[in-house]
Image (cartoon, coloured by chain):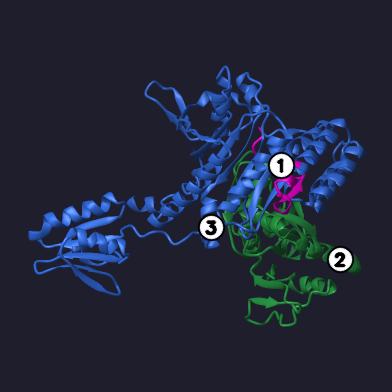
Amino acid sequence: MLQDVFHTSNTLSLDDYQKKEYLLAKMKDRFATYGYRQIQTPAFEPYDLYQTSTGMIHPEKMVKVIDPAGKVFVLRPDVTIPITRRAAAGNQLDWDDERLFYISTVFRNASFDQGEQMQAGIENFGLKTDELDAEVIALAIHTLQDLGFEQFKLEIGHAGFFKELLKQIELSKQEIEQLQAIIQAKNVSEIEAFLENLPIQPESKKSLLQIPLLYGDPEKVIKHAESVALNNQMQEKVTDLHSLLEGLKLYDAEQFISFDLGLINHMNYYSDIIFQGFVENYGKPVLMGGRYDQLAEQFERALPAIGFAFDIAAVLQVMSQQSLFPVMDPAVDIQILYTESKRREALSCGQALRSQGVRVRIDPIGGEANNQTAANVIYYKESQNLIANEKTSRAFFSQAELLDLFKEGF
Amino acid sequence: MSYLTLAMAKGRTADQTIKLLETAEIHFPAFNKKSRKLIFYDETDSFKLVYVKAIDVPTYVEKGAADIGIVGKDNIAEAQADVYEMMDLRFGTCQFVLAGLPNTAVDSGKKLTVASKYPAVTKAYFQKKGIPMETIKLNGSVELAPLIGLSDVIVDIVETGTTLRENGLKVIDTIEAISTRLIVNKASFATKSERIHLFLEKLNRALEVRM
């Protein structure tokens, strides 16, 4: 039984844990520079919350817990929904409540190594503007750069474009799902055969056939999409993308973006701009996000919002793959070994060093901890006091003398 | 410059894939099916070809070990890999079929036992039909299963139907048409979009020449 625990991928080694902390710190710092403040939502949430939020998370995928009174709770299956609910519940959203970031674990019913997923992301409840959309995408790019990635792309699409097109045709739920799967796979060879047998106007059919091809260079996609749009609503979405592109140019972000109108996110709450971030040689997106203006309406509030989240396990894996982590500090800088008669001296020296922020381990000589692992070792022996590292060693008499040796960079 | 990595399926479609690549003026001079080598480079040193088992091609591409894969739809459907399926190369055609002994009823309401090399495809098919069933995963000679009572029916790929006929089995339903497809890793598609696009265009032209 015990063994099982160590088989889940969530059991990180200490080194991996340190790396994870490193990358989370980078993200937090970057989010903060755009005015975001950290928030945490409860791990246990009422099941009802997710039942009334229609079509967002499949009930089977949530981890359910029953309290002694028989009330059903779920383990946080999503972060955006509870944060939105919180934002919607406030009467007046304070200016500094508009920008929130989180580092949270979400739980899903899945095999054990995928059931627990850490996400770090932001939610922005400001007004709906192109400027804000551009800034949020710029923040995602900025964060990826902070982590050390050079070869990455944000694919930007528009959930509304495809939704408007779907309104023009009448298909069953199952047919729509199949159609979405084909478009998501950019399966140009199968979409034609699939559409052939459906009762769709030739005009709509022509547009649907073009959807998987609407990807690549933003300017070209916009031109192409204009010719595919069937009505004003669809034209408007193309105009949205055009304004976004102009905004992103001001952040010098063009080289990091491409457009893809065949991008369909599995979370139904996205309403407008959607995007996902890919880094080289990793098949899955490391970040996903988009605008979800209607989500708050489920909580009886009109509240436009945009956000994104990083998949931390994915980021950790690619950063390790691409050697983007600096050499991590060892756990201990100095080990102090003492003989019993000099214990007081050794402790006093150790505490002085710790006060200065040096990481110290203090152990008796001859104990089990004598295998040298620290770069520097201080010996308090009967005959003399000694400080040693791989290259050299020096005797010292007083603690003051030792601290001076350190200042000189022993 | 880094290589564009192609994962090519071993087996019946390899020759046609190499021919198609040659029509597209991408040559792998050292390639030889009988060689034990698994990695080959093209003359211009811009493509790397990895020669792997067909069933593994979707995995190579999904995980990003290869940018592009060339493999049969049967393996793509079975692997359920999260990749772009961007071209139908129109060779290596055959069909997924449901087959069994004559007079086998599939919708009798009784739980069906199905033998197949493709359990994922099999499950998806029966789920769609709403027929309760149980799969038995076999790795070869699937036709044998209904003959000796291991299963009621089988799901397998069929090119001409000869094997089925010789074993006294009949096609009950055609599930899906299969041909060789070109799949693309989603991250490569985003980060190396230009090169992949050029490659696809070349292949498209080559396909037209061959038609």
Instruction: Work out whether mark 1 precedes mark 3 in sequence or the reverse, and give the earlier one.
Output: 1
Tag 3 residue: A319
SS at circle 1: loop
Q: Nearer the viewer, mark 1 or mark 3?
A: 3
State the CA–CA distance, disc 1 to disc 3. 26 Å
Residue denoted by label 2: B207
Span colored in magenta = A247-269
The extreme left residue here reads: A341
Query: Relative to A6, is A106 above or below?
Result: above
Type of the residue with mark 2: Leu
**Chain for colour green:** B
Q: Is residue A264 magenta?
A: yes
At which x and y percent is residue A102? 51, 37
Q: Which residue is mark 1?
A: A264
For the point 61% across and 46% down, which residue is it? A287
Residue A279 seen in this snapshot: yes
SS assignment at label 3: helix
Depth check, mark 1 against mark 2: the one in front is 1
